[in-house]
Image (cartoon, helix red, strand yellow):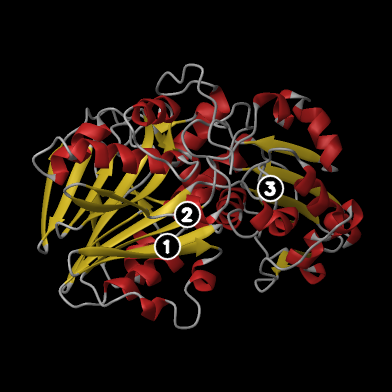
């Protein structure tokens, strides 16, 4: 199972249990004929909660002014009780859920980021990571711009506001700012000029899509959020495209060079919800096909196949379909554990996996089990899960992983540690097999994973597996904003 590497205070106890890698965030925006934008944005953020659990916020346009409520915590925590009703009724709203890959987890770093300038006010929600953010921030500071947060999203918002002072309209300012950015950015921007602007970088690193209903238009990181808010999926925002929603009307233009070479392939493996469609490919089908490829690349004689909840389940079904080995539920997942459990000792943390995932003995005792999970970074969580299976009486454990080994860090919004700390760079697969306690271990190949995701309208970034990034990253490190 993927390990979350950064030790965030707000989610440290949950990380000890789940060991999941974190992706930066999810964005949502809506333009409605009725003044229900805040409530629909809340629904959209709930559907995107898997993309970030450290902070949430909603900004609305009211009487030509932008009102914003945001805080650390889950969406339901930030907007518990009557807090959502404190936002005025509005036709336009944007929202954000955050996982902090740049900038510490604090109120100042939650989004949307609101910026004022001489001609107006904007709110910006950002998914991704800017490679040249530190350089841009330094130049803006030399021109008198102030910063209160420590993330690259504030750099983007400040740059747009700075360019707006020298532009005819907010669209021109967004284009000027975007052309100075290098890296990953899917943006949703609310302007007090009664507009919502959505923009995706030319590489297409992070997903962004459009939806329509009888009552309005919406933009979201994933199509599952459109479904939850009552919108029909319209299409993906094309890499390099800027979409403007003005007065309920949709217009678009290509404003950045369309490279289409950077979609994070791990969106299909783990980040996205299985009911989403990203750039023409069903996430569910991609995971199912990855399991089929795994069965072809690493066959084994076994009695049952089981997936590690949740993102290993679809790949397990695919493995079972291709191998003919029956797929069964191997675990019962506690979905109510929340973020409140604290485990001060290492022994308690090691036992905590049983609180989240408890083996279902009736299905696996005495069986040879193919265990399918989405990825391994350190192997500690995988070892705990396999140990729990041994204690439940399984005869053999053959682990299959639906992503290749992580060997390189990510500069575009995925929270992967330095290369020296990645287990795949420290020991061989055979040594890792022994360390986690498996009878055998197989990782899907890079080409096999690409095959599983075939049909995508954008080529993939596989830099975390291969070290071949779509763009030059220079001396940039992802830790440059890691302060608060």
- Residue closest to the eye, 15 or 57: 57
Q: Are marks 1 and 2 in contact (CB under 8 Å)?
A: yes
**How far apart in space, not on screen, are marks 1 and 2 (Cα)?**
7 Å
Q: Position of residue 137 (x, y in %)?
A: 40, 31
Mark 1 or 2 closer to N-term?
Answer: 1
- Residue closest to the eye, 133 or 241: 133
Q: Position of residue 292 (x, y in %)?
A: 55, 45
**Circle 1: is it few (<14), some (14-19), or many (20+) Cα within 10 Å?**
many
- Give the foreground label among 1 and 3: 1
- Give the foreground label among 3 and 2: 2
Identify which residue is drawn at 54% across, 21% down: 467
**How far apart in space, not on screen, are marks 1 and 3 (Cα)?**
29 Å
Q: Which mark is residue 110?
A: 2
The answer to whether 431 is drawn above or below residue 279 in the figure is above
Mark 3 or 2 closer to N-term?
Answer: 3
User: Element type at marker 3?
Assistant: loop
**How far apart in space, not on screen, are marks 3 and 2 (Cα)?**
28 Å
Quadrant the C terminus occupies: top right
User: Element type at marker 2?
Assistant: loop
Residue 124 in sight in this render: yes
**Circle 2: is it few (<14), some (14-19), or many (20+) Cα within 10 Å?**
many
Q: Are marks 1 and 3 in contact (CB under 8 Å)?
A: no
Residue designated by label 1 = 57
Mark 1 or 3 closer to N-term?
Answer: 3
Q: Which mark is residue 1?
A: 3
């Amino acid at each position: 199972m993927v390990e979350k590497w950064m030790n965030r205070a707000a989610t440290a106890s949950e990380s000890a249990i789940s060991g999941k890698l974190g992706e930066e965030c999810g964005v949502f925006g809506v333009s409605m004929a009725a003044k229900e934008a805040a409530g629909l944005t809340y629904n959209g953020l709930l559907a995107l909660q898997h993309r970030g659990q450290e902070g949430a916020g909603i900004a609305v346009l009211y009487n030509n002014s932008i009102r914003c409520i945001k805080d650390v915590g889950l969406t339901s925590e930030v907007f518990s009780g009557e807090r959502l009703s404190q936002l005025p009724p509005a036709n336009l709203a944007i929202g954000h859920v955050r996982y902090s890959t740049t900038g510490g987890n604090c109120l100042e770093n939650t989004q949307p980021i609101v910026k004022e300038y001489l001609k107006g006010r904007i709110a910006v929600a950002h998914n991704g990571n800017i490679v040249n953010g530190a350089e841009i921030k330094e130049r803006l500071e030399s021109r008198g711009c102030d910063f209160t947060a420590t993330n690259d999203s504030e750099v983007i918002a400040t740059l747009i506001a700075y360019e707006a002072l020298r532009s005819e309209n907010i669209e021109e300012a967004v284009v000027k700012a975007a052309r100075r950015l290098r890296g990953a950015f899917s943006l949703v921007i609310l302007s007090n000029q009664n507009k919502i602007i959505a923009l995706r970088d030319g590489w297409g690193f992070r997903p962004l899509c459009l939806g329509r209903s009888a009552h309005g238009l919406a933009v979201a990181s994933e199509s599952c959020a459109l479904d939850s808010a009552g919108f029909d999926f319209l299409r993906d925002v094309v890499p390099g495209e800027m979409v403007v929603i003005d007065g309920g009307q949709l217009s678009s233009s290509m404003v950045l060079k369309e490279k289409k070479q950077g979609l994070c392939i791990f969106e299909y493996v783990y980040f996205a919800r299985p009911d989403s469609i990203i750039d023409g490919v069903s996430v569910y089908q991609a995971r199912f096909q990855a399991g089929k490829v795994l069965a072809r690349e690493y066959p084994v004689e076994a009695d049952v196949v089981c997936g590690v909840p949740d993102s290993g389940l679809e790949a397990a079904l695919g493995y079972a379909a291709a191998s003919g080995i029956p797929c069964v539920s191997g675990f019962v997942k506690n979905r109510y554990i929340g973020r409140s459990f604290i485990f001060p000792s290492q022994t308690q943390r090691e036992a905590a996996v049983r609180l989240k995932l408890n083996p279902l003995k009736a299905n696996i005792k005495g069986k040879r089990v193919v265990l399918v999970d989405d990825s391994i970074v350190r192997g500690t969580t995988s070892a705990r899960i396999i140990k729990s299976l041994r204690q439940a009486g399984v005869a053999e454990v053959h682990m299959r992983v639906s992503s290749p080994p992580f060997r390189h860090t990510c500069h575009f919004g995925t929270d992967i540690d330095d290369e020296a700390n990645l287990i795949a760079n420290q020991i061989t697969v055979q040594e890792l097999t022994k360390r986690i306690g498996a009878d055998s271990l197989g990782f899907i190949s890079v080409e096999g994973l690409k095959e599983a995701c075939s049909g995508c309208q954008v080529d993939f970034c596989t830099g975390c597996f291969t070290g071949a990034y779509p763009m030059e990253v220079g001396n940039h490190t992802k830790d440059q904003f890691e302060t608060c």
